[in-house]
Amino acid sequence: MYYAYYEDGAFYRASGEQIANIDAIPFEPKDASVVYTSNPVEGRSWVADIGQDSQGNPVILYTRSPDESNHQYWYARYTDSGWEDHKICDSGPWFPQTPEGQVEREPHYFGGMSIHPDNPNVVYLSRQVDGVFEVERWETGDLGAGWSSKPITEASILDQVRPYVPRGLKADEDEVVLWMENEKYIHYTDYKTSVKYAILK
């Protein structure tokens, strides 16, 4: 998994070192900042969301999948010392409801994660609890090394997935999170879902 950003006609690594200007593209992915290298033990990665801190440093949410039955949630944050990369929690398997006797077409459709756009210490995520996906709010005070959490949904009958914090809200407004409640989700072409929300005072 690589990171680069574009600004004023050029591409840069997380450190601010220039990779290439717009006239010199394309550049190789290896020329960007390496966040995580997939391997057979820890599994492949999938980016869930990206944000930045008050200094403009990137914050990335992504999964590692050692196997299809458990997608791990990870939090990578760039500092002057390089990447701080920490596991948040295990999330469980995919959330699509695989028809009996069929092979799941989207085994990497994890429950979902979203960074609070105005507070990179806050992450909303969906993970499997007692066989059902629930939405939770997680917060760190040490760049992802330690976390506290509280439930947004509890004891659900239907899966609650893909939480998202809207951009553009004012800093003094209540915190809002939206997510999908799945009555049925076989595939993105075959589903029956509702959009739910919560307002945190």
Image (cartoon, grey):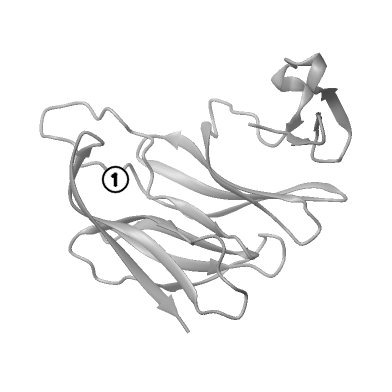
Residue type at the position of mark 1:
Phe
Task: Tell me residue 112's x, y (percent).
Answer: 42, 50
Task: Tell me residue 129's x, y (percent).
Answer: 32, 61
Does 83 sit above or below residue 121? above
Give left or right: position of 93 versus 87. Answer: left
Question: Depth check: 6 or 34 in front?
Answer: 6
Does 80 sit above or below residue 201? above
Q: From this viewpoint, which residue is outermost toward the left?
A: 100
Q: Quadrant of residue 122?
A: bottom right
Give left or right: position of 170 versus 101. Answer: right
The total number of labels drawn is 1
What kind of element bears circle 1?
Answer: loop
Does 31 sit above or below residue 112? above
Q: Quadrant of residue 126?
A: bottom left
Give left or right: position of 166 versus 159. Answer: right
Image point 36% across, 49% down: which residue?
92
Image point 35% across, 59% down: which residue?
179
Image point 63% across, 31% down: which residue?
1
Does 135 sit above or below residue 16? below
Question: Depth check: 50 or 136 in front?
Answer: 50
Q: Residues within 10 Å of mark 1 (few under 14, many from 20)?
A: many
Task: Tell me residue 176's x, y (percent).
Answer: 45, 71
Task: Tell me residue 158's x, y (percent).
Answer: 20, 59
Residue ID for mark 1: 95
